[in-house]
């Protein structure tokens, strides 16, 4: 029932033209943060009477929609560099942090039993490791009986910030990955089948015996998918949860990041989850509809102050208070109406 509910909500959020939450503000983009944005939006509507329509269509779609000014804000897990923000007249700020996790459907292998390092994961997605009992996988899993079964690779079919984080990580740790596949919100995959959104990948993995995919952790939990342990930069195998995501984010210096451009994959630390990232909100510096912009900022301001517990319940990592103050300072200095007056 939980799997059906999340999938249906995700599809509705992506497709409907009308309000999802009786919306007064609109946003579109990353599926990575959709579960927490939906939870925040529901609580915010109950608290204030103001709704939000968020279309969970992928980071690439969110960037396109905010650039075209068809929504009040865009959302992307792949941050834009300072020069791209400047070119498009945008600002960005991180709203939430979380982890991308490899998920699998292999009979007899319970959640957290499978261990992978970055090179093995890269070689699976390169098509170099085709069976679950390949010696390279067995080496990471001494004592675990792996089946003589073909690996069915599942990846994203749409422009995706989750894919950006996943491929950015593999480009850092997997020999041959950068030259063959590279990194980005969309890449040319050497093998596998594509699913649309985190929802699509989760559905494929749930249905296909012998499959492996990658999703934001909330989708793994809510769809009851088995997740792998990963070897991190310090060589320690870690389990995905808010503690390991928080450990990866602990050394982030947002104050020194131009345009708040910061990537958190492959961070040092014995407890760090290696595929951790932030999800970003994009808005135009000059607002044609300042009242809409004010409402967007009220929503995120409320969420920063009141939504930490909800985020933790879904194993996201809330933005620290020091970072929230940086974000609010950016709102004050950079968001203006057409007359040059501050919006926040």
Image: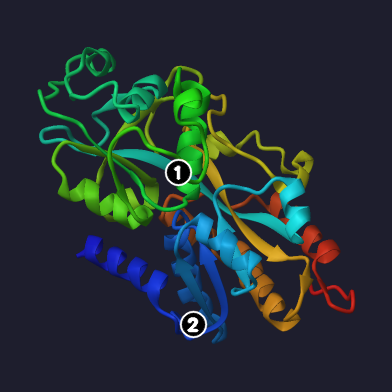
Q: Position of residue 68 (x, y in %)?
A: 63, 69
Visible residue check, residue 86: yes
Q: Position of residue 2 (x, y in %)?
A: 24, 63
Q: Nearer the viewer, residue 241 or 211?
A: 211
Residue 265 as seen in the image, left or right of residue 2: right
Could you classify mark 1 by the number of other residues whose Cα lies within 10 Å: few (under 14), some (14-19), or many (20 or more)? many
Location of mark 2 (residue) = 46
**Image quadrant occupied by the N terminus:** bottom left
* Nearer-the-camera pick, 127 or 29: 127
SS for callout 2: helix
- Note whether residue 224 is visible: no
| 109 sits to left or right of 280 | left
Residue at the image point whose x is 65% and y is 64% from the top: 67
Examine the rendered structure and indicate whether residue 149 appears above or below residue 136: below
Query: Horizontal placement of 67 versus 205: left or right?
Result: right
Question: Residue 252, image x and y in percent?
Answer: 66, 37
Q: Mark 1 — residue?
A: 163
Image point 30% across, 34% down: which residue? 191
Q: Is residue 33 above or below residue 153?
A: below
Identify the mark nearer the N-term, 2 or 1.
Answer: 2
Residue 78 versus residue 48 in the image, above or below: above
Measured Cα–Cα span from mark 2 to mark 1: 34 Å
Disc 1, SS:
helix
């Amino acid at each position: 029932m939980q799997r059906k509910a999340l999938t249906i909500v995700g599809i509705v959020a992506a497709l409907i033209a009308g309000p999802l939450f009786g919306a007064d503000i609109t946003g579109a983009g990353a599926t990575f943060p959709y579960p927490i944005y939906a939870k925040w939006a529901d609580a915010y509507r109950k608290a204030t009477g103001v709704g939000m329509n968020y279309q969970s269509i992928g980071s690439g779609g969110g960037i396109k929609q905010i650039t075209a000014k068809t929504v009040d804000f865009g959302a992307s897990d792949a941050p834009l560099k300072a020069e791209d923000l400047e070119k498009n007249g945008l600002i960005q700020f991180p709203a939430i942090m979380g982890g991308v996790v490899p998920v699998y459907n292999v009979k007899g292998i319970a959640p957290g039993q499978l261990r992978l390092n970055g090179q093995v994961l890269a070689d699976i997605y390169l098509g170099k490791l085709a069976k679950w009992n390949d010696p390279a996988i067995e080496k990471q899993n001494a004592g675990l009986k792996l089946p003589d079964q073909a690996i069915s690779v599942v990846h994203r079919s749409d422009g995706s910030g989750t894919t950006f984080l996943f491929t950015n990580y593999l480009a850092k740790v997997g020999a041959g990955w950068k030259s063959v596949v590279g990194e980005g919100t969309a890449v040319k995959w050497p093998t596998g089948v594509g699913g649309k959104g985190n929802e699509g990948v989760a559905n494929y993995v749930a249905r296909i015996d012998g499959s492996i995919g990658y999703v934001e952790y909330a989708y793994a939990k809510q769809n009851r998918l088995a997740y792998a342990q990963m070897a991190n930069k310090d060589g320690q195998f870690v389990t995905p949860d808010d503690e390991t995501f928080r450990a990866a984010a602990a050394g982030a210096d947002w104050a020194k990041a131009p345009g708040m451009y910061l990537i958190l994959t492959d961070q040092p630390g014995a407890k760090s989850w290696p595929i951790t990232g932030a999800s970003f909100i994009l808005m135009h510096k000059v607002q044609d509809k300042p009242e809409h912009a004010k409402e967007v900022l009220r929503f995120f301001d409320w969420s920063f102050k009141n939504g930490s517990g909800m985020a933790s319940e879904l194993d996201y990592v809330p933005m620290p208070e020091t970072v929230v103050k940086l974000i609010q300072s950016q709102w004050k200095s950079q968001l203006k109406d057409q007359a040059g007056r501050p919006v926040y």
